[in-house]
Image (cartoon, rainbow, N blue to C red):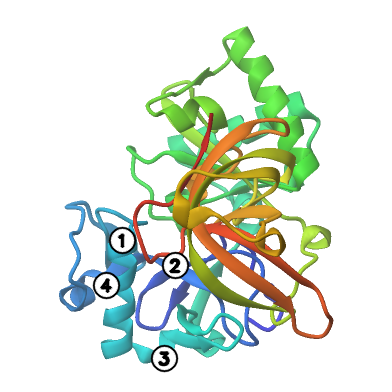
Amino acid sequence: MEKWTPRDGDAFLTKEGFVFYAFGYEHPRRRVFSFLKYIPSKLKTHFPIHFLKKRWKLGEVELVRSEKLYTAQNFQRLLETFRKNFPQHLYLCPYRGKEIISPPLRLVKGVYVPRDRLQALLEMGRRDHLQELALELATLLSNESGVPLEDFGIHGSIALGMHTVESDIDLVVYGSRNFRSLERAIDSLTGEGALSLVVTKRLDRLRKHRGRYRDKIFVYNAVRRFEEMTSKYGEYRYSPVKPVTFSSQIVDDSEAMFRPAIYQIANYQPLDSTSKLGKSEIPTKVVSMIGMYRNVARCGDAVRVSGTLERVEGVNDSDLHYQVVVGTGTREDEYLWPL
């Protein structure tokens, strides 16, 4: 664990059998900001949430998963359960003034980094049909986009080695430029009929991140390269101000494909009386903690946003600005919609 630098989407197993996914790129010393995805069946009675009927097997541990992963209500219930039964996985962040799920590295039993898991798949002697298909797709996308295969990774149940014939292929590409190259390649391959896009929701049409290759659904997302991780934990102090709903224009989408997704904005227009702000409080960016709002708007697009206004202060300098966070885990009606 000493050499592991957690990046968004890295999965890890704790000694209790929990499977967490690292969230974002800023983490306290010897802890990892995370969200919980899989829970050992034997511990599910501690969690007052609805579970899927499906079961997964990671080694000898049987796992279950919440029916709804990313609702504010479920998040609050998870916090309550951790506070009561597994307090070691909570951390009171002095820069945010609240408890955050952050397992300590001393309790991490195994780490599953997407790039490493794809490399392990390449080196595997015998692969099943889904593993072969995942490698075939990654190679096709690499060849078409010009992005080296080393800049791809595999997420999800295939990475954890607990996939079934029904599992999807969950790919990751490292770097913003590589992601944009991959987008163009997928557009080209879709036009040629080599694969097709899967659109079940309005956001699917905007993100174009879900597709079908041969007989299998795949998704792809972006992770920052190490040199793109420019901010560090403890540089800023964040203070919630109030909920706001407004429209604005995207002026920079260069970090929109990551999680958190960052959109630089201009022309803030309040959409209700409580969202009116003084000139000094006008936000300069929207930060979405909710993964489904990644890459939904491009530079020049008008958007409607509901989130929480935050005051952001530099800890070691005089920097002061405001941003709006979508996905605070405190209420359900936070969103970012292109108009």
Residue holding disc 2: 35
Foreground residue among 44 and 24: 24
> Residue 44: x and y, percent?
20, 72
Report how far apart the C-alphas of labels 1 and 4 lie in the structure: 24 Å
Tell me residue 146's x, y (percent).
Answer: 81, 30
Dots 3, 2 in contact, CB < 8 A = no
Amino acid under disc 3? Gln
Q: Which residue is mark 3?
A: 88
* Label annotation for residue 57: 1
In three-dimensional space, the C-alpha distance between marks 3 and 1, rounded to whole angstroms, equals 25 Å
Count the labels in the image. Answer: 4
Question: Residues at badges 1 and 4 in contact (C-beta under 8 Å)?
Answer: no
At x 53%, y 51%, the residue is 155
Chain-order first, disc 3 or disc 4: 4
Question: Which of the two labelled residues, at mark 1 and mark 2, occupies the earlier sequence position?
Answer: 2
CA neighbours of label 2 inside 10 A, class few (<14), some (14 to 19), many (20+):
many
Q: Which mark is residue 173?
A: none
Estimate the x, y position of residue 91 in percent, counting from the top left: 49, 87
Q: Is residue 29 above or below residue 298?
A: below
Distance from disc 1 to disc 2, alpha carbons, whole Å, reads 19 Å
Camera-nearest label, 4 or 2: 4
Q: Which residue is mark 4?
A: 77
Q: Secondary structure at mark 3?
A: helix
| Mark 4 → mark 2, Cα distance in angstroms | 13 Å
Secondary structure beneath disc 4? helix
Of circles 3 and 1, the one toward us is: 3
* Dot 1 and dot 2 residues touching (CB under 8 Å): no
Amino acid type at image mark 1? Lys
